[in-house]
């Protein structure tokens, strides 16, 4: 049954844009419009391709929103994302995301207070996942000097680690 639903979902996601493209192409060809207009037939396929790509590789805005949820504060405009990774949400909407963000010394020093006000505990529990280990490989051999975490309840976990360069953090959001 699951395999049938998976195949049906795949056919709908891929089949509808291809079918629409075909119908547009036939409409333009039948009316003898300029041949260059046939490129319009690619529009549904291009839109679906963009939607699938953005779902698999979220933008920086996605990670900024996750940071705001985890920390209770907004990221400054001038930050550099060193690493980003997120899992695709499951059928319950649960996912994990992790990012390494160079926030600058000033914001780095202010952030622990904001995290404490949000309810994250210093040196709280750390849940290691495969994504977390991959992120650590991209930390340029920096160590984690302090950590804040919180189990929000209802299966949501927040984590912020401060790296030893005094301007880079690791942010993790996990739901299950």
Image: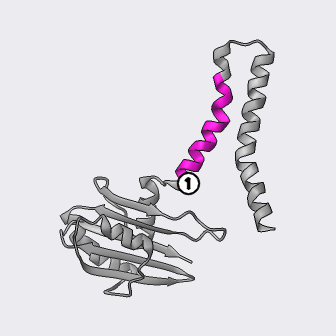
Which residue is at 75% across, 20% downward?
Answer: 28
Which class describes the residues within 10 Å of circle 1: few (<14), some (14-19), or many (20+)?
Answer: some
Is 6 in the magenta? no
User: Which residue, as the protein is rendered here, is positioned at the far front?
Assistant: 3
Q: How many marks?
A: 1
Q: Taking 167 as reference, is 40 left or right?
A: right
Q: Callout 1: helix, strand or loop?
A: helix
Which residue is at 55% across, 54% downward?
Answer: 55
Q: Taking 59 as reference, is 25 left or right?
A: right
Quadrant of residue 41 within the rendered picture: top right
Pinpoint residue 133: horizontal percent, then vertical percent: 37, 73
Of the pair 71 and 4, the residue shown nearer to us = 4
Q: Taking 154 as reference, is 101 left or right?
A: left
Q: Does residue 104 lie above or below 54 as drawn?
A: below
Pinpoint residue 58: horizontal percent, then vertical percent: 48, 55
Q: Quadrant of the N terminus?
A: bottom right
**Magenta span covers which residues?**
39-54
Quadrant of residue 117 within the rendered picture: bottom left
Is 50 in the magenta? yes
Which residue is labeled 1 in the image? 55
Q: Taking 42 as reference, is 157 left or right?
A: left
Q: Does residue 45 lie above or below 29 as drawn?
A: below
Which residue is at 40% across, 60% downward?
Answer: 84
């Amino acid at each position: 049954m699951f395999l049938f639903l998976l195949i049906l979902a795949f056919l709908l996601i891929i089949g509808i844009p291809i079918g629409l493209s075909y119908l547009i192409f036939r409409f333009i060809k039948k009316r003898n419009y300029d041949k260059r207009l046939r490129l319009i037939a690619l529009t549904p396929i291009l839109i679906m391709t963009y939607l699938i790509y953005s779902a698999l590789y979220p933008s920086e805005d996605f990670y900024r929103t996750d940071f705001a949820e985890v920390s209770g504060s907004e990221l400054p405009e001038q930050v550099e994302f060193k690493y980003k990774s997120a899992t695709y949400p499951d059928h319950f909407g649960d996912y994990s995301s992790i990012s390494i963000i160079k926030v600058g010394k000033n914001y780095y020093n202010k952030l622990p207070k904001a995290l404490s006000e949000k309810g994250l505990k210093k040196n709280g529990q750390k849940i290691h996942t495969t994504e977390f280990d991959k992120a650590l490989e991209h930390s340029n051999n920096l160590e984690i000097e302090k950590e804040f975490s919180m189990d929000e309840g209802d299966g949501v976990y927040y984590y912020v680690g401060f790296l030893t360069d005094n301007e880079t953090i690791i942010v993790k959001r996990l739901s299950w």
